[in-house]
Structure formats: structure tokens, C-alpha cells
Amino acid sequence: MISLIIPVYNEEKYIEKCINSIVDINFPALNMEALFIDGMSTDKSRDIILEYANKHPFIKLIDNHKKVTPAALNIGIENSVGKYIVIISAHSILPKDAIINFLKFHEELQCDAVGGNCITKVLHENPKSCSIIKVLSNKFGVGNSSFRTKKAYKPILVDTVPFGCYRKDVFYRIGLFDERLIRNQDIEFSRRIINSGGEIYLIPNTEFIYYARENYKDLAKNNLKNGLWNILTVHYTNTFKSLSLRHFIPFIFILSLIVPSILSLIMFKFIYPSLLSFLAYNLLIFAVSLKLNDNTTKFVYLVWAFYTLHFSYGFGSLIGIFKVMALKFKYKK
């Protein structure tokens, strides 16, 4: 038996595609369950899930009154009966052979978790949204995130995977997801696996489709929160080892602009490192955008997508620093 766990909150735009991919998967329905853990959605998500549940007994809807993702994951794990746990985003579409491949490589590799590549798409394609897709699939956009930027032709040892398939006994060994972490709970959990001597593999022939934010406003909001939660993750776990260096690069870049600029108020020559950093960044952005540009995108949209991604992420981390300072002041008080 294998258990699919799908956290849901107001996903009416995406949830039907996700459910259809689960229904159509090449695996006996009697040997799996799909647990949709809903954070009390206020749109039509619950109605859509219940409609499918009435037709397919392996689909179940479970309430998540805490509403946050890590709580949804833990509720799913605690209510699951499978030997293996698969974490799925409501924004994603599963490949037909996903479960077969997961079980095959678990048996072959005897590891703690496996996962597939993430192919980024959008619901509505236009030059702006296609530019965002390219940026989110590029190393300069998302760093050395193997599942986004590197196609697996053989099993690759990695630090984390999206939509991972875990042996259920892993959760008994190292614990459940940290419910303090509204974001990054999967990355932090992967770190615990590795720190305990476990292994995580990116496997071939298993490509999930993930529907990303398709406008600059939503991209900025999402990455502002990502940057914020990088700092809060370090605060709550009390270690930088919960994350990778790539998660802090945008923050370091923002500091390289802000700190010299502030110091230049005392001595003007400090402005030059800031200008040099910004110039170097722009040269890289322009070069990469020129390389990525094709008939589906526009150069200016690519540049703006990079700006939006990096600056919102970096400023999110800066806000996170002030948030942590406020929390520490509150604790002392």
C-alpha cells in the first residue's frame, strides 16, 4: 500500500488537474490511497475533491483546522496506512508511472526518499508567464536546485526532492514535519534525513509538472515569503544546516547593495562596492536573458522576472532578520 498526501487550501484552479493525474496513474487503486488534507478552503476545492471521492473510494478528504502545510502533512501521515508516503502539491500533475518508478528505485537503492524532476509550467502561456517559467528553470534563477535544473538519467544523490516518496518508517525514526515552519518544512526534513545518515535520490523517468505563479505580483509575493522563511527556519531550528547556501545568495546580494550604500553616508567611496555589485549583477542578468530569449518570451520580461525573483527573495530575508530581532526582544521582555 502507498499513501499520497496532498495539502490543499483554495486550489480550485489547479486541483482538478492534480486529481485527474492521480486517477489516471498506472497503479492499482486498491493498493493506494489519496489523502487530500484541506485547510478549510473557502473556494470550490472541497466540492471538487468530494465529487471525485464519491466516484473513487481511494480518494479521501480530511480537515486541517490548523490550516498550515506542515500540519496538513503530519495529519496525512498519521492517518495513512501505506508503507510509503508520497507528498504531492495541489499545483502538480503526476506522471503516469510515478508510483511504479518510486517503488522500483526504493527497492533498488534501499534509501529513505526518492523524487523526480520538476517541469515548471503555467496555466496560461504568454510572453510574460513563459519568461517566468524560464527563470524558474534556470540555475541563475533558482541556484543549484537539481530537480529543477538537471534532468536525471540515472539516480543522483541530492539534498532534497520535490514531491518525495518516503519510507514511512523514516517518520518514526526522525520525527514528523516541523509545524513551526510554515515554509521550508520539506527542506528541513530532508536535512534531518541526511544528518541521520539517510540518502535521498533524484530518479530518472519521473517528471512532475508544477504550475507556477504566472505574473510578477504573485511571483514577488511567493518569493518574499520564501526569503522570510529562510531566516525564520534558521531561527526556529537554531542552525544554518537546515538549509543550503543557495537559499541565502539573494540576501547576500541585497546586503552587498545596502551596507556599502549606508556606509557611503559616512565616507562616499563606500558606494563603489555597491555600484560594482549592481553592475556585475546586471551584466549577468542581461547575458543570461539574451541566452534564454526565444519566440515564446521577451528579453525585457526575462530581465524583470529575474529582478522580481531575486529582489523579492532577498528583501524577504531582510524582513526575516527584523522579524527574528522582534521575536527575540519579545522573548526577553
Image: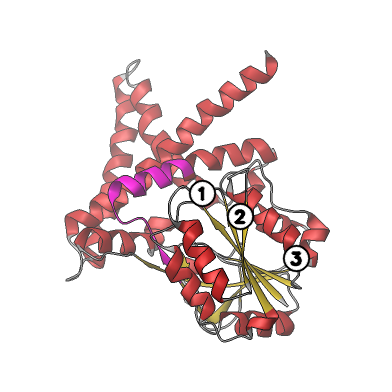
What residue would you read off at disc 2?
187
Residue 247 has which mark? 1
Q: Position of residue 231 (x, y in %)?
A: 56, 38
Q: Is residue 212 left or right of residue 196?
A: left
Image depth: mark 2 or mark 1 in front: 2
Placement of 119 over or under 31, stated as above or below: above
Residue at image x 47%, y 67%?
Answer: 92
Q: CA distance from mark 3 to mark 2?
A: 14 Å
Q: Quadrant location of residue 138?
A: bottom left
The reply to whether dot 2 and dot 1 touch (C-beta < 8 Å) is yes
- Helix, strand or loop status at disc 3: loop
- The image quadrant where one finds the N terminus is bottom right
Image spot of residue 54 (x, y percent): 56, 71
Amino acid at circle 3 = Gly
Residue shown at the point (68%, 59%) measured from the top left: 76
Secondary structure of residue under mark 1: helix
Quadrant in which the C terminus appears: top right
Magenta-highlighted residues: 209-225
